[in-house]
Image (cartoon, rainbow, N blue to C red):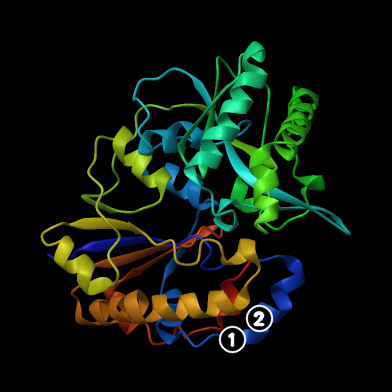
């Protein structure tokens, strides 16, 4: 029996800043296999973020009036204990830079963090805010966690939604927003004067001058693996897999590698990070290069497998509000002509 493949590809079809949509639409990338797949697919409503897509795939509810509890789950991937009843908040290290139009945020990818720097900043944070009952832990250099006894009345915006954006409209909100935004100011002052950042500035490195709160909540229960085979490197998928007691393998580089790894599996889910940060970084050139790579490694081979009947169905999850299902019989839908990729962007 031919297998079924789910591809979760954040950033593949946006969302792009409105100011760049005209440029993106003008580029018209040459991805005929992807266009063929999208044109012949059945389209279904889907969440607008990759994190929500993954929650849905693993059978977990998406809260309406609270953050998606990403922190508690990525902490599982980073070595946290299952069954911890704490309320966890991501507090990731970032660099804030004043701009003519506000304050812009750069995430840890540009910081070149060293273990000693992380250790020193986390230590001074915990010394300073111990009386407030706050304890910070850095299980990874780029993923920091704040444990709280209960929901503090805070709602936030995911980190990928604020990278390179003006923070004036993206600050934490909710009943306790004033307290937590005040805490952010205190953290910025604390880090600004720390010797770690003085040394970084002497080395012409951007200072680690704040953290970004997001993804708060308690660890959910009841997750179940959506497929027989999981392949991912992102911490959320790996945390969900651990919660579901499911094995997760490394990401195959191309379809042939997946076929070898998934031999005998009826269905698989692969999370491809290739385009995740392209919209956030506002880098159309990188996006063009990345989707060309995906075209060669995944889309064109999947098109061939579908045409040959060796792939029963391909489910594309680009986290743009829609999912696309292409079955092997779609090869006979000659009337469904490919459209420009700009038709699917948001």
Q: Quadrant of residue 215?
A: top right
Q: Position of residue 78 (x, y in %)?
A: 38, 37
Mark 1 highlights which residue?
28
Locate the N terminus and report the quarter of the image it occupies.
bottom left
Q: Is residue 159 above or below residue 222?
A: below
* CB atoms of marks 1 and 2 within 8 Å: yes
Q: Residues within 10 Å of mark 1 (few under 14, many from 20)?
A: few
Element type at mark 1: loop
Q: Is residue 206 visible?
A: no
Q: Please state if 306 lies on the left or on the right of 148 as rendered.
A: left
Q: Please state if 224 lies on the left or on the right of 175 as rendered.
A: left
Residue at far top of view: 131
Q: Position of residue 263 (x, y in %)?
A: 12, 62
- Label number found at residue 25: 2
Q: Is residue 239 above or below residue 278?
A: above
Residue drawn at 68 percent across, 27 percent down? 154
């Amino acid at each position: 029996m031919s297998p079924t493949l789910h591809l979760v590809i954040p950033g593949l079809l946006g969302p792009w800043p409105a100011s760049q949509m005209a440029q993106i639409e003008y580029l018209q990338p040459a991805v005929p296999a992807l266009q063929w797949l999208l044109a012949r697919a059945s389209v279904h409503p889907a969440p607008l973020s990759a994190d929500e897509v993954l929650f849905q795939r693993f059978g977990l509810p998406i809260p309406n009036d609270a953050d998606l509890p990403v922190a508690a789950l990525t902490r599982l991937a980073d070595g946290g204990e299952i069954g911890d009843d704490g309320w966890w908040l991501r507090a990731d290290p970032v660099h804030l830079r004043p701009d003519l139009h506000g304050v812009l945020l750069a995430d840890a990818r540009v910081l070149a963090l060293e273990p000693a720097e992380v250790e020193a900043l986390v230590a001074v944070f915990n010394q300073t805010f111990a009386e407030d009952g706050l304890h910070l832990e850095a299980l990874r250099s780029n993923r920091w966690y704040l444990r709280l006894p209960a929901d503090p009345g805070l709602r936030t915006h995911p980190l990928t939604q604020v990278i390179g954006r003006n923070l004036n409209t993206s600050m934490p909100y909710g009943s306790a927003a004033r307290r937590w935004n005040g805490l952010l100011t205190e953290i910025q002052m604390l880090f600004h004067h720390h010797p770690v950042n003085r040394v970084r500035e002497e080395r012409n490195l951007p200072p680690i001058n704040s953290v970004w709160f997001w993804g708060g909540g308690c660890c959910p229960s009841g997750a179940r693996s959506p497929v027989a085979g999981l392949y991912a490197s992102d911490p959320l998928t790996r945390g969900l897999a651990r919660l579901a007691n499911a094995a997760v393998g490394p990401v195959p580089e191309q379809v042939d590698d997946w076929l070898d790894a998934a031999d005998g599996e009826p269905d698989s889910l692969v999370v491809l990070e290739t385009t995740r940060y392209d919209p956030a970084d506002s880098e159309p050139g990188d996006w063009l290069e990345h989707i060309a790579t995906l075209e060669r490694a995944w889309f064109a081979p999947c098109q061939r497998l579908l045409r040959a009947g060796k792939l029963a169905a391909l489910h594309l999850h680009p986290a743009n509000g829609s999912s696309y299902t292409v079955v092997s019989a779609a090869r006979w839908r000659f009337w469904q002509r490919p459209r420009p990729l700009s038709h699917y962007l948001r």
